[in-house]
Image (tube, grey):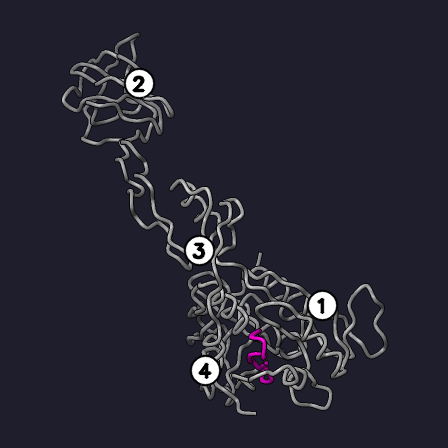
Amino acid sequence: MKLLPVAEARARMLAEVVPLPSERVAIADSIGRVLAQPVVARRDQPPFAASAMDGYAIRLADAPGRLTVVGESAAGHGFEGVVAPGQAVRIFTGAAVPAGADAVVIQEDVTREGEFVTVPAAKLGQNVRPAGGDFTAGQTLLDAGLRIDPWRLSLAAAAGAADLPVARRPRVALFSTGEEIVEAPAEPGPFQIYDSGSRTLAALAGGWGAEVSRARPVRDDLEATVQALRAAEGDLVVTIGGASVGDHDLVRTAGQALGLQLRVSSVAIRPGKPTFFGVLADGRRMLGLPGNPASALVCAELFLRPILAAFQGADPALPMLSARAEAPLAANGPREHWMRAQVSFGDGLTARAYKDQDSSLVSVFAMANALLRRAPNAPAVEAGGSVEVLLLPRA
């Protein structure tokens, strides 16, 4: 099998991904979805000059001085008249600044006596939020390809959006293979282990915007594997285990029975070398991940995550960061190595790679909050040296 560099393998996978059609969803249902079209402001925000404080709207020319209070402007209902010389209007935060007024003095700085108020000197525009100070009509507020989070939802709502055009969720069909895999609550045999890979990958893919269907583990039987692949409905089929070329690794052979054309046969990566990707005869994309949990999860971060982003029209680039190595790192071998690590956020980012990087260890992944990248044949790194990290979102 030809080992492809990680970047080339990812590029070949992404070349086979076409963004999915869009659909409109209620803004309340848009969290986690990717915008298919920009969000454009329909009007200025705020649509009028508004007070930033509780106080009195005045004419700058009248301050300092003793003014007559002639009305009130509150949020939702403003003062409809014009502030004339010698007049002031009681105003509250967020309320429209009335015509004729060009400053607001806060209530703590004035003296109120019945219908009169004594105000100090002021500055032009003091405590006034200008019309369009947040955004203006016709302004692009959110670009296509952005994933909606609560803060972006707030901006879209402020622009008056009731629904949003978003990419359809990519449909992912997922299953594990192997005689050794059993799904809880079934009792494992003496030589079996519980299936953790498919549950974890289903959660990851769902968080990355996919609609996931997860089938039960498939035993090491060619016909059963072919049938499982044939029944897997989706834009992308993801398998865990059986990706290599051993006697019991049947996933590639099963895929070839369904017309699989490989675009990536294996990757020069540690862990995860057997990872493959191709296109089935019916057009479904297929990503084969190794069975060892760390291998599967590392390769999901590096390949499945960008693939799902590309299906949704989002940027598939990985958000790599620079950090300082907490301890020395040995020179790397010929395969790109992605090490589970712990990043500390203090005076800059500091990364500590876990000593045991065995690809079967789920416990290490549960502690890690980052992957530390070591380039092929990278030289040794001293403590304090620069390393690249990919953060793993943790609660």
* Magenta run includes residue 283: yes
On residue 90, the disc is 2
Residue 92 is drawn in which quadrant?
top left
Q: Are marks 3 and 1 in contact (CB under 8 Å)?
A: no
Residue marked by disc 4: 8
Which quarter of the rendered picture does the N terminus lie within? bottom right
| Mark 4 crowd level (few <14, some 14–19, many ≥20, 10 Å Cα) | few
- The image position of residue 197, as x and y in percent, is 67, 70
Query: Could you tell me the amino acid type at mark 1?
Result: Ala
Q: Are marks 4 and 1 in contact (CB under 8 Å)?
A: no
Reading the chain from its start, which is encountered first: label 4 or label 1?
A: 4
| Mark 1 crowd level (few <14, some 14–19, many ≥20, 10 Å Cα) | some
Reading the chain from its start, which is encountered first: label 2 or label 4?
A: 4
Disc 3 vs disc 2: which is toward the camera?
3
Reading the chain from its start, which is encountered first: label 3 or label 4?
A: 4
Reading the chain from its start, which is encountered first: label 1 or label 2?
A: 2
* Nearer to me, 375 or 242: 242
Query: Could you tell me the amino acid type at mark 2?
Result: Arg
* Nearer to me, 145 or 260: 260
On residue 148, the disc is none
Name the secondary structure under disc 3: loop
**Residue at image location 23% in from the left, 31% down from the top:** 126
Query: Could you tell me the amino acid type at mark 3?
Result: Leu
**Residue at image location 18% in from the left, 24% down from the top:** 121
On residue 215, the disc is 1
Residue lying farthest to the left in this orientation: 61
**Residue at image location 49% in from the left, 66% down from the top:** 311
Residue marked by disc 3: 35
Specify the segment rendered in magenta: 272-284
Reading the chain from its start, which is encountered first: label 3 or label 1?
A: 3
